[in-house]
Image (spheres, rainbow, N blue to C red):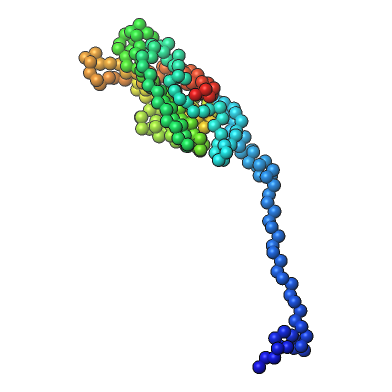
Amino acid sequence: MISEPELVGGADGDPVPELPLPQEPAPRRRPSPRSWLWGLGGAVVASALWAGGLYAYHATADGGPGTGPYGTVDDLCGKTELKSLTAIYGEVQTREPDTRTHEALDRASCYAFFQAPSDSEAPGEGAELSVSASAVYVLHKKTDPGPEFDGVVATESEMMNSTSEEVADLGERAYLAKGDGHLALQVLDGQAVVRLSLDVYQADPEGSTDAEPLPDVADSKDLLVADARALLAELRNGDG
């Protein structure tokens, strides 16, 4: 039987020395905000200063990318003047705007329909033409559209059976797709993606609904680029 001294003492009855209590680990030192901000700053500046419209990067309250000079547009037709195209194809007869907003992105479009007069310098002079132009503006508010932009352009060109070429000095990156009777210019500028297209068809003289596209519509490339440049300038104003 174990006696009481044996429970509290050593072999000679001496008290057992108390062991030191384990110490709580010291709290880990959090890195200084300045250290990671400097590292992040270089990447932010590199991705936020675009070739076609340099602007300061500002993160939103929820950590998403800033939209720079671009904002929501209520009526894209009000900003899509098409001055260069109308000088050749005649005045726009009708315009159809549309705007959709979402927390992740905004999408605005404008469809313009006009017909060239018979004495114009448009392709197929003297023939009755069916001419339309469309503008689409997408503002990405949560993610960077840059990484997928080239893939979207390439996929669309393949679907439309058209060829595509890069357009210099327009936005961050820009590509022009050319097909029979069809031109489509897509521009990436920061968080904004703008698409401006032109379709020109020659009406069948018998009144058939199967209009034949004009193959030489590619001559309007410079007109489309000029109108896209003007549209980007209007969108940067941010007046809605």
Residue at 45% of width from left, 35% of height from top?
102
Residue at 56% of width from left, 30% of height from top?
68
Residue at 39% of width from left, 30% of height from top?
157
- Of all residues, the one furthest to the top in this rendering is 119
Residue 175 shows up from this direction:
no
Quarter of the view holding residue 107: top left
In the picture shown, does residue 210 fall above or below 46? above
Question: Toward the viewer: 150 or 37?
Answer: 37
Residue 202 left/right relative to 141: left
Q: Which percent across, then down, holds residue 41? A: 64, 38
Residue 138 left/right relative to 182: right
Q: Which percent across, then down, holds residue 236? A: 54, 24
Question: Toward the viewer: 93 or 125?
Answer: 93
Q: Which percent across, then down, holds residue 213? A: 31, 20
Q: Which percent across, then down, holds residue 138? A: 46, 30
In the picture shown, does residue 225 fall above or below 58? above
Residue 65 shows up from this direction:
yes
Residue 214 left/right relative to 104: left
Quarter of the view holding residue 178: top left
Q: Quadrant of the N terminus?
A: bottom right
In the picture shown, does residue 193 fall above or below 205? below
In the picture shown, does residue 22 fall above or below 229? below
Residue 211 left/right relative to 103: left
Question: Toward the viewer: 154 or 93?
Answer: 93
Residue at 64% of width from left, 38% of height from top?
42
Number of dots carrying numbers? 0
- Of all residues, the one furthest to the front in this rendering is 4
